[in-house]
Amino acid sequence: MSIKDKLNIIINKLPKEVSLVAVSKTKPNDAILEAYEAGQRIFGENKIQEMTQKWEALPKDIEWHMIGHVQRNKVKYMAEYVSLIHGVDSFRLLKEIDKQAKKHNRVIPCLLQMHIAEEETKFGLDSSELNHIVSSEEFEALKNIKVIGLMGMATFTDNTSQVRKEFANLKSMFDGLKNSLSDISVLSMGMSGDYSLAIEEGSTMVRIGSSIFGARNYS
Ligand SMILES: *Cc1c(COP(=O)(O)O)cnc(C)c1O
């Protein structure tokens, strides 16, 4: 099946209020262009250098989302163009994004990444760290970032009731955040294997890679 066909199958399953980030990490420009020609405009990458090369080479109306873990010393390479940073998991990182955004006279939209999975290895904040960040005066002083929601990754398991519980937990933190901040609108949760569950639990943005572009080859 072509990329275009796989993309359309997914788009047809998404409620209209759920947006799709086509995760193109490790995939070549011609694969991205095929999805672009089918109408897709939002693409997700997890390496800043790879994303920047693609941004330079590909049509400028693509919105690039950074979905991976962000190293502070690399923020400068994407500050000019990135549309949304999903994986913000510390105040220090937020501060660096603010500083680099300022150099380009931009306000960069960000999502705070929450740790919802059982695995130790997944990055993210817990709810007390979240509250600590968003209630601080230093946070309020950052004028070149805008936190517009939350992102999370569920445990990689076949146990759907566990995955559902983790998504529901993220959704309740998202609803709670609306009490502290204005313009909270994006809940980024759901990947190829679990996006239907994520949508049932209130996702507004899904990040789907392999179901569109095929399995990734990291060799
Ligand atoms: C790779 C990746 C995805 C997409 O995963 P698929 O299973 O290929 O859909 C989604 N979110 C993040 C953070 C990723 O790193």
Image (tube, helix red, strand yellow):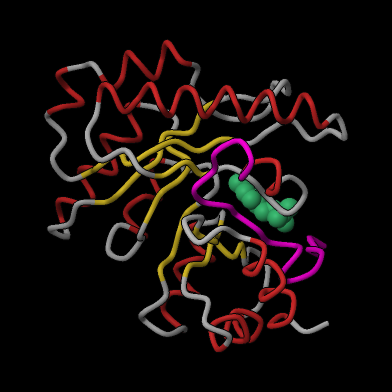
Is 24 positioned to the left or the right of 213 in the image? Answer: left
Instruction: State the count of labels.
Output: 0
Tell me the quarter of the image containing the N terminus: bottom right
**Up/down of 25 relative to 205, above or below:** below
Is 142 positioned to the left or the right of 200 in the image? Answer: left
- Tell which of 63 and 202 is nearer to you: 202
Q: Quadrant of residue 142?
A: top left
- Tell which of 147 and 177 is nearer to you: 177
In magenta, the rendered stretch is 199-219
**Up/down of 22 relative to 95, above or below:** below
Residue at figure coordinates x 36%, y 79% from the top left:
61
Residue at figure coordinates x 58%, y 85% from the top left:
38
Residue 40 belongs to the span the image colors magenta: no
Most distant residue in the right direction: 158
Residue at figure coordinates x 41%, y 34% from the top left:
112
**Up/down of 188 relative to 3, above or below:** above
Horizontal and vertical percent position of residue 107: 20, 51
Horizontal and vertical percent position of residue 121: 68, 27
Most distant residue in the top direction: 128
Q: Quadrant of residue 11?
A: bottom right
Residue 204 belongs to the span the image colors magenta: yes
Horizontal and vertical percent position of residue 35: 60, 80
Residue at figure coordinates x 77%, y 84% from the top left:
2
Horizontal and vertical percent position of residue 137: 14, 18
Is 175 positioned to the left or the right of 134 in the image? Answer: right
Tell me the quarter of the image containing the C terminus: bottom right
- Tell which of 125 and 197 is nearer to you: 197
Is 69 positioned to the left or the right of 137 in the image? Answer: right
